[in-house]
Image (tube, rainbow, N blue to C red):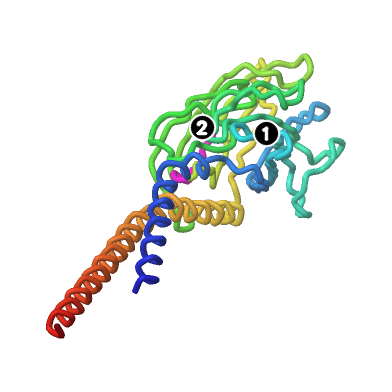
Amino acid sequence: MKVLARVLLGLGGFLLIAGILAVSYAPGVVKKTPLDVDTTTIYEGQAAKLDPLTGDFETRPAYAIRHTMADSKKSGDDHVIMVETACAVFDTGGAQECVNGNDPDLITASIDTFAEDRVSAEAVDDKNLPADAVAHKGLINKFPFDVAKKTYCFWDGDVGDCVDIDYQGTETLFGLKTYKFSYTVKDVPIQIGEGITGTYDNVVTVYVDPKTGSIVKSGQDQQQFLDDGTPVADVVLTQTDDSVKDAVDEAKTAGTMLTILLTVLPIVGFAGGILCLLGGIALVMRERNDESGTRVKETETVSLSK
C-alpha cells in the first residue's frame, strides 16, 4: 500500500505539471510555423497569352506548379525564411513540370524569397534575406493559427502590396471545415515587360483551415492588359482535387496534434493528476489509520496481560 500511495502521488504530481505546461507553455511552442515546410501545389485551368509576333491570343489548357520550402538554416525561433518557386505552363498533355525559359509553352515563372513571423504569419524583415529580396507585407502563404472571421491583408506580388482579403463563409473540403476568403483587384497599374506598362485584374480565392491557418485550396482569375486595352494574359487556375486532398490531410494531422497537446493533455493532466493525488492521499490516510489502530490494539493487549 505504501508503494501504491507513492506511485499515485508521484504520478499525480507529474500529470498536474504536464497539464500546467500544456496550458502555459505549449501554445507558444506548438502554434508556430514549422521549419520543415516543403510543399508542392498543383493548379489546372486555362490560359491565353499574347504572342507579340503574330498577335495570337488563343485560350488553351494550362497548369501551374508552386513549390514552397522553408530555409531552416537561415530561419530562427521567431522568423522563418521561405523560398517559393512557381511556374505556369500551357498543358500539351505531357508531364506536368516547370519548363525552361526558352520553351514556348511557358507562361510565367518566378522565384520569391520572403520571411514571415512564425506566429502571426505576417511578412517581416529579416537580416538573413538576400539583398535583392522584394519587401513583402501582410500574409503571404498562410494565415495565423486560430483564424478569425475577419478581413486580413494578403500579399499580391503583381500589385506589390497586400490587399484586403475578406471572409466569405465556410465550406467543407474532404471532411475539413474551412474558411473561405477572397479579394478582387481591378485596373491596377503594372509593369508587364521592360518598358511596357499596362493594367492588372485578379480575383483570388483561398480556403483556410481555421485551426492551423494552412491554405488548403486556392485559385485565381487573372487578366493583364496593355494601356490601350489590348489583352496580354488571361489565366484562370484552380488547385487540383488531389493537391487539395493532400493539403487537407496535412491540416487534419496538424490539427489533431494541436488538439492532443492543447486540449486533451491539459484535461488528462489536471483531471488525472487530481484523481491520482486524491487516491494517493486516501491511501496514506488509510495506512496511518491502520497503523494507529494497530498501536491501540497492541497497547490494549499489553494492558490486559498485566
Residue at the image position 30 percent from the left and 62 percent from the top: 275
Q: Amino acid at mark 2?
A: Ser
In the image, 178: left or right of 270?
right
Which residue is denoted by mark 2 in the rendering?
120
Highlighted magenta segment, given as a residue range: 204-211
Q: Position of residue 137 (x, y in %)?
A: 58, 23
Residue at the image position 39 percent from the left and 56 percent from the top: 13
The crowding category of the residue bearing disc 1, from other C-alpha atoms within 10 Å (few below 14, some 14 to 19, many at least 20), is many
Q: Quadrant of residue 170?
A: top left
244 or 70: nearer the eye? 70
Query: Is 107 above or below relative to 265?
Result: above
Task: Please tell me which of labels 2 and 1 falls first in the chain.
Answer: 1
Query: Is 183 above or below relative to 176?
Result: above
| Quadrant of the snapshot with the N terminus | bottom left
| Quadrant of the snapshot with the C terminus | bottom left
Label 2: state its secondary structure: loop
Residue at the image position 49 percent from the left and 54 percent from the top: 257
